[in-house]
């Protein structure tokens, strides 16, 4: 675990002066409280030409079981995606070994709302948000894979069932319920499709929504090259409906609404069965993530939330079994 | 008679009450963690009430499922795993269960 600098203001000031000159300075520095496995700092970059609000994200935890992309890959992905015009926070610079911060990177600050329950409370713009999400996905899935060749080597870019089994093995705790899900995936595989650039964490909670709807897609730490239906399935995974269980697509619309919006935006015709396959994949994956956080807790990254995650894996396992039996849709 | 008053369940309830009282006075991050801590105490309270899960070799079962050895016995395997999962959820968060699975 990298040392947290005792004075992030001095470290950030050094980092921006290296890149923007001696007159650059940092103002209004705050640290986001619920940063998950990352440290997130918000600050103003003040230059003679003007002031920009920026966000610094640093990886503060690494472990051999860590399934997340290293920050330098995330930065490269966001740079290419931003250039394509898909809404994503503008990448500004990545930390290097000369910085006292990092590994991590700095992007533009995008204002808006990300909290799922607040987004779902106001239903007036849900159909617009769903259309914008589908449009962003269609454009993402059409990007040239040559620009993401560095993702070809990660396990998730290979066979999705084998990759998930490998992740599950990495936490060294038997989960028969998740194994039932894996076995179901193995025996119910959809037809192979042309590979695409997949966001990988496309779910309610990672969408910055502003007055005009979708302002930015956040969290590019699970991206891979594979079946674009993975993004639609993860969005529909029951854990991300936040109580709106009949509105499969993150609470913004039904599974069929999402399929229609993806098609209307120029995407391929994806079947409900393909999405359901990836929802089963998503429930296993979310169960695994919870087990991973529980492992992190007992390995020393201690917090009440991570402790709860370890036991909470049983909740995803229940949802998975109810889904496999057809009780849940 | 085992130990002196209060019972272990009462000790947990005492901590939970205290967390509930100080929670509203905390900043948002700590308030969230206090809520999570109450959830953790609830798990322990329910485990004390219901007793621990039976000690089962889940490693062997997990391997058998992955290798396909349970494919011909899928429904029975599913029922076994579901029953155990329900026992877990009863301790972790019983209101997550469908009514037919809640005791």
Image (tube, grey):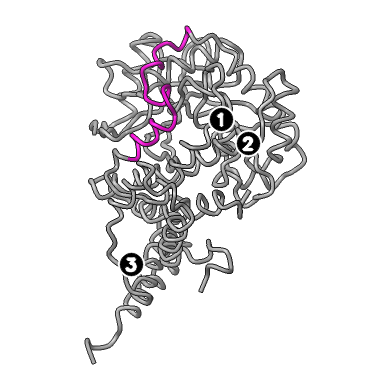
Write down the chain letter for disc 1.
A
Q: Main secondary structure of the magenta part?
A: helix
Provide the residue designation for mark 1.
Answer: A190
- Cα–Cα gap, marks 1 and 3: 37 Å
Of the numbered discs in the image, which one, if any, rests on residue A251? none
Labels 2 and 3 within one chain: no
What span is colored magenta in the figure? A146-168
User: Where residue B6 appears, x then y in whole percent?
Assistant: 29, 85
Label 2, secondary structure: give it. helix
Q: Nearer the viewer, mark 2 or mark 3?
A: 2
Answer left or right for A193 relative to A147.
right
Going from N to C along the chain, the mark reached first, 2 or 1, is 1
Nearer to the camera, A12 or B58: B58
Residue drawn at 40 percent across, 35 percent down: A164
Provide the residue designation for mark 3.
Answer: B53
Write down the chain letter for disc 3.
B
Q: Is residue B26 visible?
A: no
User: Where residue B30 appears, x then y in whole percent?
Assistant: 41, 54
> In which image quadrant can residue A255 be found?
top right
């Amino acid at each position: 675990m990298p040392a947290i600098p005792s004075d992030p203001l001095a470290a950030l000031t050094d980092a921006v002066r290296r890149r923007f000159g001696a007159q650059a300075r940092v103002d209004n520095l705050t640290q986001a409280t619920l940063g998950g496995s990352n440290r997130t700092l918000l600050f103003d970059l003040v230059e003679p030409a003007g002031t920009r609000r920026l966000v610094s994200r640093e990886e503060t935890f690494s472990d051999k079981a860590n399934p997340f992309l290293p920050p330098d890959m995330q930065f490269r992905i966001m740079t290419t995606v931003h250039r394509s015009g898909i809404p994503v926070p503008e990448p500004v610079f990545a930390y290097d070994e000369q910085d006292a911060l990092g590994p991590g990177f700095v992007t533009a600050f995008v204002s808006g709302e990300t909290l799922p329950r607040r987004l779902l409370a106001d239903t007036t713009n849900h159909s617009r948000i769903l259309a914008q999400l589908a449009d962003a996905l269609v454009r993402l899935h059409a990007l040239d894979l040559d620009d993401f060749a560095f993702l070809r080597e990660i396990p998730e870019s290979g066979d999705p069932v084998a990759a998930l089994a490998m992740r599950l093995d990495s936490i060294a705790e038997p989960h028969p319920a998740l194994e039932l899900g894996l076995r179901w995936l193995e025996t119910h595989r959809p037809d192979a499709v042309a590979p695409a650039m997949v966001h990988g964490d496309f779910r309610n909670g990672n969408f910055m929504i502003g007055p005009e709807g979708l302002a930015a897609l956040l969290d590019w730490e699970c991206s891979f090259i594979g079946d674009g239906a993975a993004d639609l399935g993860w969005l529909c995974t029951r854990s991300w409906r936040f109580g709106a269980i009949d509105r499969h697509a993150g609470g913004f619309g039904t599974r069929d609404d999402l399929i229609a919006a993806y098609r209307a935006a120029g995407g391929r015709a994806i079947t409900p069965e393909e999405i359901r396959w990836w929802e089963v994949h998503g429930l296993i994956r979310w169960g695994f993530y919870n087990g991973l956080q529980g492992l992190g807790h007992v390995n020393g990254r201690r917090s009440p939330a991570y402790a709860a995650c370890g036991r909470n894996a049983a909740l995803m396992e229940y949802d998975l079994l109810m889904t496999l039996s057809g009780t849940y849709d | 008679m085992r130990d002196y008053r209060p019972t272990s369940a009462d000790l947990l309830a005492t901590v939970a009450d205290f967390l509930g009282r100080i929670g509203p006075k905390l900043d948002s991050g700590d308030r969230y963690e206090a809520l999570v801590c109450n959830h953790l105490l609830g798990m322990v309270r329910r485990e004390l009430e219901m007793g621990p899960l039976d000690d089962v070799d889940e490693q062997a079962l997990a391997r058998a499922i992955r290798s396909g050895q349970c494919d011909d016995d899928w429904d029975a395997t599913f029922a076994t795993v579901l029953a155990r999962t329900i026992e877990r959820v009863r301790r972790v968060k019983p209101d997550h269960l469908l009514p037919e699975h809640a005791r």
